[in-house]
Image (cartoon, helix red, strand yellow):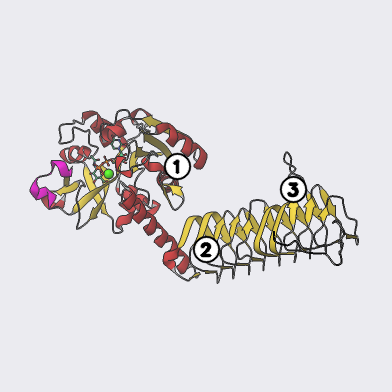
Amino acid sequence: MKLDVVILAAGKGTRMNSNLPKVLHRIGGRSMLEHVIAAAEKLGNICLHLVIGYGGEQIKQHVALSVDVGSINWAIQEPQLGTGHAVQQTVAALNSNHKDNLVLILYGDVPLIKTTTLEKLLSLANAETLSLLTLITDDPTGLGRIIRGDGNAITAIVEEKDASAEQREIKEINSGIMAIPTIKLVRWLGELKNHNAQGEYYLTDVVAMAAKENCNIVANVIEEDFEIQGVNDKSQLASLERRYQMNKVDDLLAAGVTLRDPARVDIRGELEIGKDVEIDINAIFEGEVVLGNDVVVGANVIISDSVIGDGSVILPGSNIDGGIIGKNVSIGPYARIRPGTILKDNVKIGNFVETKNAIIGKGSKASHLAYIGDAELGENVNIGAGTIVCNYDGINKHKTRIGNNVFVGSNSVLVAPLELADNAFIAAGSTINRDVPADNLAIGRGKQRNIPGWKRPVKK
Ligand code: UD1
Ligand code: CA
């Protein structure tokens, strides 16, 4: 039996002051909508319904690019006449063939909801029971209030704009997230009226309908409010971002990582760590990053979609994107490792060295100021300061192959396609555009002349 999950994402989000649809704004590097979809997907066996309106096409494109889910039922809500009206747009596609079927309502702008919380909420709902996620808060301003009657039973949800002064004092609020028996929901949605302060079709009105029919209504009172916090403006987006980062950092600390300052690390994706990892301030991790045992990450390092092997050290200011880094490698300070770079064990990449599409063999070094692109280097190669691999002729990229124990003198230019065989030695300042056989010295530069008695120019 599939669970229908409806995610509301039709609103414009005027207060975001942005052209981007609200649910595409990001937290921890992923759109709010991606977070919500991921939390729902983890429930397993769901049928996903996305209600879109403002920026609908952009949302569809984003989901197609970034989310790996099965089919989605896209429901267009145009115009947007309220949350009840939004859910009405999905009715034809809901699985309403069995009385035990449930619909879970989520919001594209409530990004940090946890799967475990949703599982709890769903476990409370059934064919005769609607379950709500509520919160008790000192500041209920703007939110729907949970009305309880005899024996504390929930009888209705009243929106703030429709609430009496007395009802506004109520501290229990509606998160909006609820699980509802499908067949009943479909019937209730058909009976919604918009006779209220906002002239909208409120989803929350189904609660009073349920109470009238003696359908059970249970509340799961949530403890951690961040899970149900919605984002309406940039300030709320920023505070949820912080909250999200704090949660990530707590997990890392629990797993044994040493963080020089937990408030100054950002994880925008998934970070997997080994034992005894140390991370200095202002490190940013993007996409999928794996740090092995005893890895040290210096200050101001950015690592994206990379794997760093045991014992490797990333010195301050380095940027690693799409790298596969072996064991006991030293990178930086201020190195740039670009996609397609594979550094084998004990490699050293020093300051102001850039690599791209480069496989660098065990123990090889490029300690200062070099560019190594579209190249394959053997073991124990030494790349002198200022060496440039010219991989691009303006039209095509070409490959450079360098054997084991090759020594490239400082300020050399290696014009690809090129092969330097084992033990080749390149004299400093050479421009090399012909292959160098094994054990050869190659000198490719103008000969030095010394001119005795040369007079310096004099000022006129
Ligand atoms: C809603 C609830 C309120 C709850 C609050 C929690 C209703 C009537 N009220 O109020 O009880 O305390 O959320 O934040 O449900 N949306 C659509 N189409 C629409 C209207 C809204 O897709 O026609 C989407 C919005 O994009 C947004 C969400 O539904 O993501 C909530 O809508 P919003 O207008 O913000 O509802 P609230 O007034 O905050
Ligand atoms: Ca809202």
Tell me the distance, in whole angstroms, between the alpha carbons under discs 2 and 1.
Answer: 42 Å
Residue tagged 3: 391
Segment tinted magenta in the rendering: 157-169
Residue 350 is covered by the magenta coloring:
no
Residue tagged 1: 45
Q: Which residue is drawn at 33% across and 30% down?
A: 77
- Give ligand 1's quarter of the image: top left
Count of marks placed on residues = 3
Left/right of residue 421 with respect to residue 276 in the rendered view: right
Pick out the residue farthest to the front. Answer: 460
Residue 167 is covered by the magenta coloring:
yes
Q: Quadrant of residue 200?
A: top left
Q: Is mark 2 on a helix, strand or loop?
A: loop
Q: Position of residue 233 (x, y in %)?
A: 31, 47
Q: Of the residues shown, which amino acid type is indicated by label 2? A: Asn
Q: In which quarter of the image is residue 316?
A: bottom right
Q: Which numbered tag is attached to residue 300?
A: 2
